[in-house]
Image (cartoon, rainbow, N blue to C red):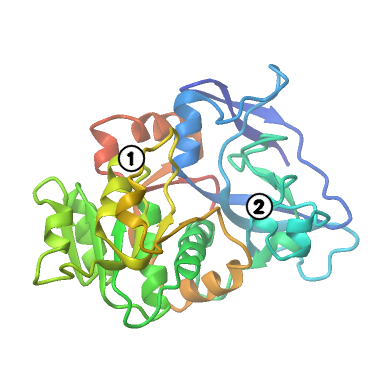
């Protein structure tokens, strides 16, 4: 077997380099990578370099963490997997020793080892990779490996929906209908919520939101979102009980503040890269602002939701690229014209 990996040599430039096939440790599986999803964080890293630059300037930078494939070898202590199994992985591995891990919040463990970021910057855009058995999952019969790779972003949506308390009867608005916003929508629906409004400025994404089950959509480029939601025909003076900010924009944060109900909740799903001013006087009636970080114990539930069709990840994929075209894939993802049509891109490494 031969192996290679896509390495970010400078911002906006990948090189596919030969590398050894890793040998799985006692508790690891060796996986032949089949599909890797293109996350917004990967695209940002491609364009600007890692969020947190490595201490060693010679550190190799790999990208990609939404991944699924086939087991080709297992370590001596692995019991749940064998060669030939189709699997997906949870890419953030905690140390299991911190107080956060002990209290069940392993996603915020300060020593978590996450693919495509510090401390190792090991990316999934490669032909073969190892991963701990504990953080590996079987792909159910009937689910493709492409769908398996997209369980990871779906789990982000599930975690956010559960943190927000999405339930039957709750009024919900999702600001941003990119890949994560659409995952939040479907996760909320899977938990029983039905009164869900999705807001974006791209009609193609809003059409997908309607297809997936949104009760209504608002094109923020054409309508005053807050005025529409605060109209007597919708939520009026009461406001919206649960707002998900999934656009990562200071503008939508302040929209959330203006539309949320007294005693309501705002869940921050999008990444705010700069400080944001908030008028707390508008939300000093016991509004909760909840940040969401990745996922925590959400993979089993998310796998079932995808396998049973409650979350449709397949129809979110707008662009599929071959591994050899990884440079083209990410270049198009940052192109102002092309990215407007891209909802979710994936890289096909192998069949």
Relative image position of residue 130 (x, y in whole percent): 74, 49
**Earlier-in-chain disc, 1 versus 2:** 2
Please determine whether, in this image, residue 63 is positioned above or below residue 292.
Answer: above
Using the rendered image of the protein, determine whether residue 176 is visible from the camera's viewpoint: no
Which residue in the protein does label 1 denote? 250
Measuring 26% from the left and 50% from the top, which residue is drawn there? Answer: 255
Q: Secondary structure at mark 2?
A: helix
Near-viewer residue (184 or 145): 184
Measuring 52% from the left and 70% from the top, which residue is drawn there? Answer: 302
**Total numbered labels placed on residues in the image:** 2
Please determine whether, in this image, residue 229 is positioned above or below residue 280.
Answer: below
Q: Secondary structure at mark 1?
A: helix
Which residue in the protein does label 2 denote? 108
Please determine whether, in this image, residue 348 is positioned above or below residue 120.
Answer: below
Measuring 45% from the left and 43% from the top, which residue is drawn there? Answer: 271
Check the picture and name the quadrant holding the N terminus: top right
Residue 30 is marked as none
In this view, the mark in front (1 or 2): 1
């Amino acid at each position: 077997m031969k192996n290679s990996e896509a390495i970010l040599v400078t911002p906006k430039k990948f090189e596919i380099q030969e590398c050894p096939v890793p040998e799985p440790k006692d508790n690891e599986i060796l996986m032949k990578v089949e599909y890797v999803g293109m996350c917004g964080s990967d695209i940002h890293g491609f364009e600007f370099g890692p969020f947190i630059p490595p201490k060693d300037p010679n550190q190799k930078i790999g990208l990609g963490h939404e991944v699924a494939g086939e087991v080709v070898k297992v370590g001596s202590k692995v019991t749940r997997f064998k060669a030939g199994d189709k699997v997906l992985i949870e890419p953030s591995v905690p140390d299991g020793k911190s107080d956060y891990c002990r209290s069940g919040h392993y996603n915020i463990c300060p020593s978590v080892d996450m693919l495509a970021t510090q401390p190792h910057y090991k990316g999934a855009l490669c032909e073969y990779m190892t991963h701990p058995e504990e953080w590996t999952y079987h792909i159910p019969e009937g689910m493709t490996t492409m769908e398996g790779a997209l369980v990871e972003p779906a789990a982000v949506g599930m975690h956010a929906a559960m943190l927000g308390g999405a339930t039957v009867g709750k009024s919900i608005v999702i600001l941003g209908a990119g890949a994560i916003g659409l995952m939040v929508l479907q996760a909320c629906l899977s938990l029983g919520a039905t009164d869900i409004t999705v807001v974006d400025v791209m009609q193609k994404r809003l059409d997908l939101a309607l297809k997936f089950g949104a009760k209504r959509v608002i094109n923020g480029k054409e309508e005053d979102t807050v005025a529409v939601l605060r109209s007597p025909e919708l939520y009026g003076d009461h406001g919206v009980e649960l707002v998900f900010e999934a656009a990562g924009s200071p503008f939508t944060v302040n929209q959330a503040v203006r539309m949320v109900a007294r005693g309501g909740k705002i869940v921050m799903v999008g990444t705010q890269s700069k400080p944001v001013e908030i008028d707390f006087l508008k939300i000093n009636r016991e509004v909760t602002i909840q940040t969401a970080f990745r996922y925590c114990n959400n993979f089993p539930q998310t796998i079932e939701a995808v396998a049973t069709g409650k979350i449709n990840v397949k129809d979110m994929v707008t662009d599929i690229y071959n591994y050899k075209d990884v440079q083209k894939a990410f270049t198009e993802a940052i192109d102002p014209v092309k990215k407007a049509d891209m909802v979710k891109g994936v890289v096909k490494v192998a069949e």
